[in-house]
Amino acid sequence: MKKVLFSLAFGLTVVSLYAQRDHEPYLQKSFARGAVHELEAQTSGGNISVFGSATGDARVEVYVQGNNGRWDLSRDEIKRRLEEQYDLTVDLQGNKLVAVARSKKNFNWNNHGVSISFRIFTPVEVSSHVRTSGGNLDLKDLTGNEDFRTSGGNIDAEHLAGTIIGRTSGGNVSISDSRNNIDLQTSGGNMDAKNCEGKISLETSGGNVGLRAVKGTIRATTSGGQVEGGQINGELYAHTSGGNIDLGDVSASLEASTSGGNIHVNFQSAGKYVNLSNSSGDITVQLPGNQGMDLRISGERVHVTAMNNFRGDQDEQHIRGTVNGGGIPVKVDGNGGSVHVSFK
């Protein structure tokens, strides 16, 4: 087992130290790719990037900045501050690659703090445990159990597969070209998912949620923002406490609700059910005209285009009946708003 544990008071030839000129890494360390099956990465305030690769050795690059993003610290000054402020480890422990920067207790930061960031290159098939207290996270081309969290930074994930768990307290979250089991949350930022497939959960306390070309069992919720998207297949639950819901090119079962905004949905084909509701806004829905449906539609005022083979009752506030012989349950509850229904 190769092991390098350092406090930056060493002269080992296997470790390369670089000046920070032109943003070069302060430290770079390589490991045989076949030895790395897991990753643990942690830093107090810097960014962490993890990139999977089908070729080449695993590698850790360490970048150090001074206060306010300064890159002009000398190598000697960086070394002194790191020795005072951090316990820094780059280590291969069994099959786990460890890159951890922990601040020392009882250190008086004043104006001499530093920020430590990692750029990490691993094999594609690696499970990761990644943490930063305030920086951004960037993960690409990984397959395994990926668990990544930041207290306030943004998350950008691409080409991930497996069990994917991501959390940020206030940043934005973006994921694309990923699959299997995706669970992402932010306390206040926006969320965006594109070209993803599987079980997908996106939750934000105040931002918007965007969905593009997603397939599977999908949950998209926000406490105050918008939910919008298109090319949605499978099953979708969408909820916002105050914003609008705007969905196009839907081929899915759908439950969508908002407490104060409008709902606009265009279906290519309906799935096993359709359930739309709001408290005060309007609902506009375009349904496929060639599918059998059981309609239960109500609102302050209900507007509907011609219905194929309709059997039932309707008035200005209700539609109850079937089209095309019945089948898919379609419930639309506009409460105090208007409902507009069309068929294509």
Image (cartoon, rainbow, N blue to C red):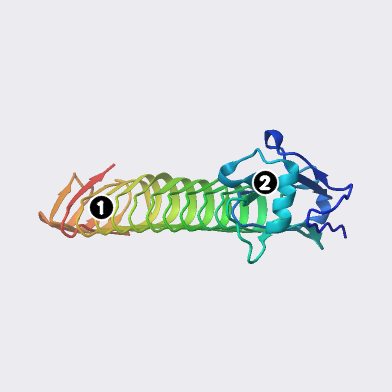
Considering the numbered disc 1 on the image, is that residue within a helix, a strand or a loop? loop
Asked if residue 125 can be seen in this view, the reply is no
Asked if residue 252 can be seen in this view, the reply is yes
Q: What amino acid is found at the position of numbered circle 2 in the picture?
A: Val
Depth check: give the residue in front, 225 or 340.
Answer: 225
Q: What amino acid is found at the position of numbered circle 1 in the picture?
A: Gly
Q: Residues within 10 Å of mark 1 (few under 14, many from 20)?
A: many
Q: Residues within 10 Å of mark 2 (few under 14, many from 20)?
A: many
Q: In the image, residue 344 lies at what x, y percent?
A: 29, 41
Q: In the image, residue 95 lies at what x, y percent?
A: 80, 60
Residue beneath label 1, please? Answer: 261
* Residue 215 versus residue 163 in the image, above or below: above
Q: Quadrant of the N terminus?
A: bottom right
Write the residue at 65% across / 38% down. Answer: 72
Image position of 323 (left or right of 1): left
Image position of 308 (left or right of 53): left
Considering the numbered disc 2 on the image, is that residue within a helix, a strand or a loop? strand
Image position of 124 (left or right of 278): right
Outermost left residue: 316
Residue 64's disc number = 2
Depth check: give the residue in front, 133 or 58.
Answer: 133
